[in-house]
Image (spheres, rainbow, N blue to C red):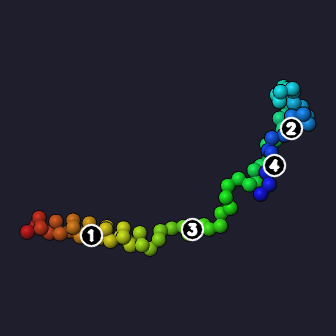
Amino acid sequence: MSYTNPDPDPRRSTGLEPGGGVPPGETPPAESSMPGAGPQELHNPPKGWAKGPLTLILAVVILVAAGFLAYAIALML
């Protein structure tokens, strides 16, 4: 990977005052992009819920519902 300085050389840029300022009415030089920013992403995990966590959540919900049902039946007796 090669490194390129994204900042322009103020001595060769048009419209810049000494010290790098831009006079009124002038457009400053554009920024360059950074093509080497960040690592290359090779793997995107699938979207959605995995089967294991979804099954565990469903089991907990069923156990809580069964507990409420048993408590309601116990109150009626």
| Residue 20 pos. (x, y %) | 83, 30
* Label pair 4/2, CB-CB below 8 angstroms: no
Q: Would you place residue 5 above or below residue 77 in this image?
A: above
Q: Is residue 77 left or right of residue 5?
A: left
Q: Secondary structure at mark 1?
A: helix
Q: Is residue 54 left or right of residue 69?
A: right
The picture places residue 70, in percent across and down from the top left corner, at: 17, 69
Q: CA distance from mark 1 to mark 2?
A: 69 Å
Q: Tell me the kind of residue under disc 3.
A: Pro
Name which of mark 4 and mark 1 comes first in the sequence: 4
The answer to whether the residue labelled 1 contacts the one labelled 2, judged by CB atoms less than 8 Å apart, is no
Measured as percent of width and height from the top left, residue 36 is found at 74, 55
SS label for mark 3: loop
Who's the residue at 57% across and 68% down the image?
A: 45
Q: CA distance from mark 2 to mark 3?
A: 42 Å
Give neighbour class at mark 1: few <14, some 14-19, many 20+ (Cα, 10 Å). Answer: few
Circle 2 is placed at which residue position? 9
